[in-house]
Structures are given as C-alpha cells and as structure tokens.
Image (cartoon, coloured by chain):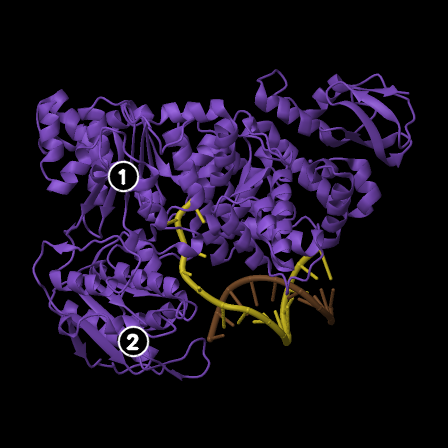
Chain colours: A purple, B yellow, C brown
DNA sequence: ATGTAGGTGGTTTTT
DNA sequence: CCACCTACAT
C-alpha cells in the first residue's frame, strides 16, 4: 500500500497532491489551462480505488466529450496496471514486456474498471434511462420504453419543423423552426418544462414557443424517442419523482467526479445534486461520511454559454455543497495554477487579456517554463494575404528542420467560413492539413440510413427514422402516398407502422401505390425475425443485403458509391467492436453509442499535418505553434457579442483558450480588409483583444505575401413485442405460422363502426373505422389508454359486446 | 415520383 | 460564395 501511494503521488505538485489525496466531502478544483487536471482526476480515482479500497462500482466520473472520457479511461487503465505490475510481477511497469503490459491492462479493464462508470453526461444518463425509463410517470401521461430512439439535432429539427408547419399551421418564416428548436433546447437545458415556459411568457411569440415545446414533447413520446436534451432532463424528473430510483443511484454513486464543471448547465447541475444528495438537502448538515463530490473546472475557459452552460454554477459550488460541521469552507477549494505547457511570455499575454473580464474566480497562471519568444502580430492587407502570411510562417519555421513537422501547427478561427481561404493557401503551397470537425461519421447519409433501419426494427414507433428509409432504396413511394398514410395515422391515432402493415387500409387509402409499401414491410418483417438472436453487426449486414441498399450502391458503380460502401463496412466494424467490448452487445446499446459518438479522430489519415479548426474545437488541446486568425472587431469578437458585456467576456475567454493552447509560439493575425461571403471588401478594425495584450510581449511583423494568389401487419408488431420481453418458442418462426394461434372466435361476424368489443390483451374497445369490405376487412379499434390498433377480425382474439 | 432551377440566409456547437 | 430548401416542371 505504501508503494502504491508513493507511486501515485510522486510526480505531483503540492496542489495536485492535495486534490489527489482528497477522499470524502466536496471539493472544487480550479484548474487553469495546462495545469495537469486530467492527471489530478485520474490519480485521484486510482487513489480512491487502490489507496482507500473504494469499490469502483461506487464511482461515477462524468465528462463532456467522448474524447475526454476515453482519455481518462486509458490513463486510469495504465495507472492501475502499473500498480498491478508491482503486485503480480514485483517489478515496475516499464521493465515489463509489451505483451505483459497489455495483459495487465486487459486484467485491469475486466476486473477493476468494468463497474466504474466513466463517460459523458449523455452516455451515462442514457444508460440510466435504459434501466429505469419505464418507471417514470409523466404528468402529461406521456410514455417511453427502454427501446427509445435517440434523435440527433437533425432528427429533432425535422420533428419541430413538422409541428410548426403541419400541427400548428404556422408560417415557418415568422416562426423559424430552427429558432424555436433552439429556444426549446434552451428551456430543457435550464430544467424548464413547457408549463414553466408558458408561465414566463408575456407575449404571443413566447406562448407559441411554449405550445410548440408541449407538442414537440408529445410528438417525441409518440415516436418513443428522446432528443439529446431529454437524456439529461428526463432523468432529473425521474429522480425527483421516484424515491426508490433516486435512492438506488444515490447509494450506488458515493464518489462523483465532474470534469469541466464550468460547462455544466442547470439540468446537469440538478442531476449531480440529486445523485449526490439523494433524499436529503445538501446544504444543511449533510453527511459526507462515506461520499464525495469532486469537480474540476476553470471559469476562464467557459465558452459554451450559448448552449446554456453556466459557469456561475462552478462559482456557486462551495455554497451549494457545503462541507460538514467538521470542516471549514476553505478546505473545499484547491487551485491548480502551475502551468506546464506554455512559455511565460505566452502565459503573461493570456493572463493580461483575461484580467479584462469582471466575472472571474481569481486565478493567475504561473509559468514553469522559460520566457520563450514574443508573440507575433501579423497585420495583413486582406484575408488572402493573411492566409499567405500564415503559410509562409509555417514554411519558414519548418526550413530549420530537415523533415517538415507539420503537426506542430494549428490554425484557429472564430467561424468555419474562414477556413476556405486558409485551405486554398495551404493547397497552393502543398502543405498537408487536416480540417477538424467537418462532417461527422454518424452524420453521413449512408450511415444514417443504415442506423435508421436498425432504429425502426428496435423501435417501430420511430417515424422519423421510418420515413427516412421507407423509400431508400427507391421503392416508388412518394410524398403524396406518405402524406395520405400519415394523415390516416394521425386521424385514427394509430401508429404509422401498423397502418403500413394492414393491406385493407392501404388499399382504401392509396390503392395501387401500395405496392412499394408491401415491398418495404416485407423486408422489415423479414428482418424482424432476426432481431432476437442477432447482434448489431449481423443485423446491419442483413439490413444492407435484404433491403437492396448494397446492391443499389453496387449498381451505380461511382467513386462516391464506393466510398459509401467503405463507410458502411466501417459501421459494421464499429458494431463488431461494440459487441466485443460490451457484455450484452445489445442493439439498443449500440444505437445509443452511435447516436452519442462523434468520432473526431479524423487525424488518423495524416498524422503529420497542420490542424485547422475553430477556437471552440481547440479547447483541451495543445500545439507547439498556434495561429489565431481574424482578430477583427465583428469577427472576433463576433458582431453578435460586441455590445453585450457578458457575451464579449465569453469571446475574450475564447481568445484566452486559443492563446493557452500554445507551447512555444503564438501568432495573432488580422486583415485590414476582408470580404465575407464574396461580397464587398470591407475595411476592418483590429480586435479589442489585440490592445489588451501588453505591447512589450508582442512583436509586430509585416507579413510576407507569397507570389501566387490570384486568387409493418399488426400481428407482427404485437409478436415482436412479446418476443423481445420474454423468450418464447415463436421467436424465429415465420409470421404466418404464428398468425393461426391468434385466430379468435369472431369469425363471420359483420362489424360496423361504433361496435364495442373485448380483446384478450387490450381489453374493451370501440370500432372507429372499418377498412375494406366483405372478407377483406380490417377494424380500427380504440382501446382506452392502450391507444388505437388495426385488427383483422378473423384473426384477432376479440369478442363482440352488445 | 423525381429532377433541377431559383430563392434565401449565413457564429460558435463537447452531446 | 455556397449549402439548403421550396417550387415547379417533367
């Protein structure tokens, strides 16, 4: 044990040591840029487990990005493996063979980390929801099941748009769906319900937004879907409402760690508070005897307020989570101010800049490195010469090296639109570059299509996904057909999927155009037979083959279709990997991962290249040389923040983040003239931030401009539900074989609208519509709270009631 | 049912 | 300047 401690503690400074040794009670760690906060976090977790015998099952570590979660896991794995190296082999980690190292890491992963929850807010709480969502009782009577779909920004946007234009009949120009979605999202992030919003509304527009919010929620529930915000908001409501559920998670997670606490929003804060405090109020006489809350953050790096992040939550931490009677408040704060990344000139510049902000926690980064070079100001004529000046600088700095090291350079910008000119210049000079945060893997059309198939198989209520793939590949199902079926579904309040599976209602509603729908439901019903016994990888393979998606791509034979096929193969690989990494390898879990993973590791294509990205994307990274571009009033700071002090302060923090990414050199550039989207050239004013950096830290330089430049039937639906919840003998039998089992006693009865009946499973119902006539009829029946269904009277277990 | 011509609007975005 | 959406033509 003492060996453990030695080894965990030895490379830490005083403040880090205090943070790592902290075990019980609340602790706020203010961690400046480059001050080793990930080290503090991982070493503390290791110390909890190894030094204090805390069961990893009781630890919850939350991050904001997958990347941060992944890094934390990896580093923790190594730390614990190093520990094991001593115990098992009696020698330090470094002297072990690689094969033994890997063996140890695998052991650690399987024995120690299996039950430790590390992940993003969204992934962890979607996991919680997969356990407990069916225990939630909504005040509006809405329901979700554990097969819920997760809608990404595009899917939810689609839904909102539909609600605005069709459900509410509003003009999308006056009521911009994008804006409405943003306002709803904002409300959700502030833990506000539609009713809360309605109470606050003092004008018609706000009332409309509240109404849209309410309808949007109903719509999500009908689709058995949740958007990103719901993954956090729903757990809050569930935990507030259900004492047993709350107590369970509270007792389970005795040690909670939150990274980037300044980026938490109201909803995330509520979540943390609920789990930490359980059924008690945290402020008064809270018993911290066997638990802790440990948060790490830096108010100066809060740059996501537009996503409802609120750094005042960080500032309020000590007040929110007061230490117990035996400790005083002072012991609940540790500042990590020693910077191990940047030269002192760079730190001085960053410190001077950020001092211009009024809302801060007092903190000064202290250098551990030499003065280094001065920062360089690049004053350029226009955006093209700015780009040229940057490429020139990169080239000349590389001339001092035999082999160009491009990966040491990052070019940062405020808006994505700025990247084009920069790219053109890099291409011209044949400098390899990687542009960060472009099209995400799971956003690609073919990937979204394949995933949509999987979503519909798991969750037949998911209409957004269903409508996405109903005519992909082409089955001759057009807009009007879909519109008619949707209308019917809405009018009778019967899920679209059930409508699609009823031959009579199709004949009556769309007649000849039913052919394509038959094709579609046949494929889907076939695929459903495999759902019970196949993993996501095999299912995807089957989807692509049986739907005709793959053969469609093959027949087109273009280069683009080949790319798409490769991407789909990669998706199957990702599914296989998921199956290997998880115990259950369940489809629902895979779908969550797919929805919440934004694979930004695009750098693997060319590891040695210049990085281009937005300042927002640069947070948490570091580079030898950093270029911050477009330092002009209206661009950076952006024109939308320029006259609002709090927004301007956020822009300043963004600039601070940019500067503190650099280890050795910082270049700040501005153009005297710039044209945004091809319009007029406009004279610019240099950014206020430039004037906030002491002159003696900056080296003005005239830029060298380079030469170039010119510049579903119902039976199946029921069946699959039975199948999924309890294993039974029908699981893989064809549908027709099962159908007979349902043959009811009502054969030969002639039905009329308004007839009452009793169904063996759904109970009492009333016929609201009859499709077809004679032998070929279907009944649309409304069952109290079970919703409405379409039944075949010859097969359904129903009995007429007079 | 599907292709293309015009019109519009355009910070940032961990999930 | 360019990506996206709507409207109209085929």
* Crowd rating for badge 2 (residues with CA inside 10 Å; few <14, some 14–19, many 20+): many
Are callouts 1 and 2 both on one chain? yes
- Residue depicted at x 62% and y 34%: A139
Write down the chain letter for disc 2.
Answer: A
Residue A740 in the image, given as x and y percentages of width and height? 76, 19
Can the viewer see residue A469? no
Q: Dividing the image into 4 quarters, which one contains the N terminus of chain A? A: top left
User: Which callout, 1 or 2, points at the residue further toward the start of the chain?
Assistant: 1
A783 horizontally vs A267: left or right = right
Instruction: Name the element at disc 1.
Output: helix
The quarter of the displayed image where residue A3 is located = top left
- In this view, the residue in front, A146 or A470, is A146
A597 horizontally vs A105: left or right = right
- Residue depicted at x 44% and y 29%: A585
- Residue depicted at x 37% and y 24%: A252
Residue A670, numbered circle = 2
Residue A256, numbered circle = none
The quarter of the displayed image where residue A744 is located = top right
- In this view, the residue in front, A640 or A504, is A640
List the residue tagged with mark 1: A72
Q: Compared with residue A747, is residue A545 higher up or lower down, i.e. above or below?
A: below
Q: Compared with residue A162, is residue A63 higher up or lower down, i.e. above or below?
A: above
């Amino acid at each position: 044990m003492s060996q453990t401690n030695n080894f965990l503690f030895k490379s830490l400074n005083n403040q880090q040591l205090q943070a790592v040794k902290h075990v019980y009670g609340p602790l706020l760690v203010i961690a400046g840029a480059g001050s080793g906060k990930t080290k503090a976090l991982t070493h503390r977790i290791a110390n909890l487990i190894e030094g204090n015998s805390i069961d990893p099952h009781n630890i919850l570590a939350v991050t904001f990005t997958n990347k941060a979660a992944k890094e934390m896991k990896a580093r923790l794995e190594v730390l614990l493996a190093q520990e094991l190296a001593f115990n098992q082999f009696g020698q330090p980690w470094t002297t072990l063979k690689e094969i033994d190292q890997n063996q140890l890491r695998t052991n650690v992963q399987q024995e120690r980390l299996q039950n430790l929850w590390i992940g993003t807010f969204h992934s962890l709480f979607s996991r919680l929801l997969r356990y407990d969502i069916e225990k939630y009782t909504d005040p509006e009577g809405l329901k979700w099941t554990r097969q819920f779909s997760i809608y990404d920004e595009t899917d939810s946007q689609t839904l909102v748009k539909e609600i605005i234009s069709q459900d509410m009949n509003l003009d999308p120009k006056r009521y911009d769906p994008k804006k409405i979605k943003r306002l709803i999202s904002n409300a959700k992030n502030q833990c506000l319900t539609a009713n809360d919003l309605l109470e606050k509304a003092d004008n018609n527009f706000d009332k409309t937004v509240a109404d849209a919010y309410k309808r949007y929620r109903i719509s999500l529930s009908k689709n058995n879907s949740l958007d990103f915000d719901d993954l956090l908001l729903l757990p809050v409501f569930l935990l507030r409402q259900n004492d047993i559920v709350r107590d369970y998670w509270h007792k389970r997670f005795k040690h909670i760690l939150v990274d980037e606490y300044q980026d938490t929003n109201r909803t995330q804060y509520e979540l943390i508070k609920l789990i930490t405090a359980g059924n008690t109020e945290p402020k008064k006489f809270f018993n911290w005897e066997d638990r802790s809350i440990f948060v790490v953050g830096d108010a100066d790096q809060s740059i996501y307020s537009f996503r409802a992040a609120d750094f005042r939550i960080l500032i309020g931490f000590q007040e929110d989570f007061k230490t117990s009677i035996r400790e005083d408040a002072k012991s609940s704060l540790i500042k990590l101010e020693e910077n191990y990344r940047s030269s002192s000139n760079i730190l001085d510049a960053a410190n001077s800049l950020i001092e211009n902000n009024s809302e801060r926690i007092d903190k000064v980064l202290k250098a551990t490195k030499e003065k280094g070079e001065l920062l360089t100001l690049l004053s350029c004529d226009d955006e093209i010469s700015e780009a040229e000046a940057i490429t020139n600088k990169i080239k000349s700095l590389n001339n001092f090296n035999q082999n160009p090291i491009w990966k040491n350079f990052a070019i940062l910008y405020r808006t994505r639109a700025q990247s084009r000119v920069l790219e053109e210049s890099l291409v011209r000079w044949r400098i390899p570059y990687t542009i960060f945060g472009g099209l995400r893997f799971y956003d690609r059309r073919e990937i979204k299509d394949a995933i949509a198939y999987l979503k519909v198989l798991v969750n037949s209520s998911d209409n957004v996904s269903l409508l996405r793939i109903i005519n992909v590949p082409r089955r001759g199902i057009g807009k009007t057909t879909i519109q008619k079926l949707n209308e019917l579904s809405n009018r009778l309040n019967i899920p679209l999927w059930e409508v699609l599976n009823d031959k009579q209602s199709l004949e009556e509603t769309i007649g000849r155009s039913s052919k394509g729908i038959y094709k579609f439901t046949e494929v889907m019903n076939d695929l459903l037979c495999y759902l019970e016994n196949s993993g996501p990888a095999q299912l995807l393979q089957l989807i692509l083959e049986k739907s005709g998606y793959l053969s469609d791509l093959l027949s087109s034979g273009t280069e683009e279709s080949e790319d798409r096929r490769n991407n789909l193969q990669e998706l199957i690989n990702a599914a296989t990997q998921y199956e290997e990494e998880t115990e259950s390898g369940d489809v629902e879990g895979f779908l969550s991962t797919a929805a919440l993973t934004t694979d930004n590791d695009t750098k693997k294509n060319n590891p040695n290249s210049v990085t281009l990205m937005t300042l927002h994307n640069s947070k948490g990274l570091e580079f030898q040389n950093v270029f911050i571009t477009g330092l002009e009033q209206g661009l950076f700071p952006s024109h939308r923040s320029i006259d609002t002090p709090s927004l301007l302060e956020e822009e300043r923090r963004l600039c601070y983040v940019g500067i503190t990414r650099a280890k050795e050199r910082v270049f700040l550039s501005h153009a005297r003239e710039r044209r945004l989207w091809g319009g007029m050239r406009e004279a610019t004013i240099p950014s206020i931030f430039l004037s906030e950096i002491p002159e003696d830290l900056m080296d003005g330089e005239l830029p060298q401009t380079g030469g170039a430049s010119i510049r579903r039937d119902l039976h199946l639906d029921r069946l699959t539900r039975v199948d999924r919840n309890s294993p039974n003998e029908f699981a893989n039998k064809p549908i027709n074989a099962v159908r007979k089992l349902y043959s009811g006693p009502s054969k030969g009865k002639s039905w009329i609208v308004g007839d009452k009946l009793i169904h063996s499973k759904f109970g009492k119902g009333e016929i609201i519509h009859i499709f077809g006539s004679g032998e070929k009829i279907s009944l649309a029946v409304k069952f109290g709270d079970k919703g409405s269904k379409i039944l075949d009277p010859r097969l359904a277990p129903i009995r007429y009631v007079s």
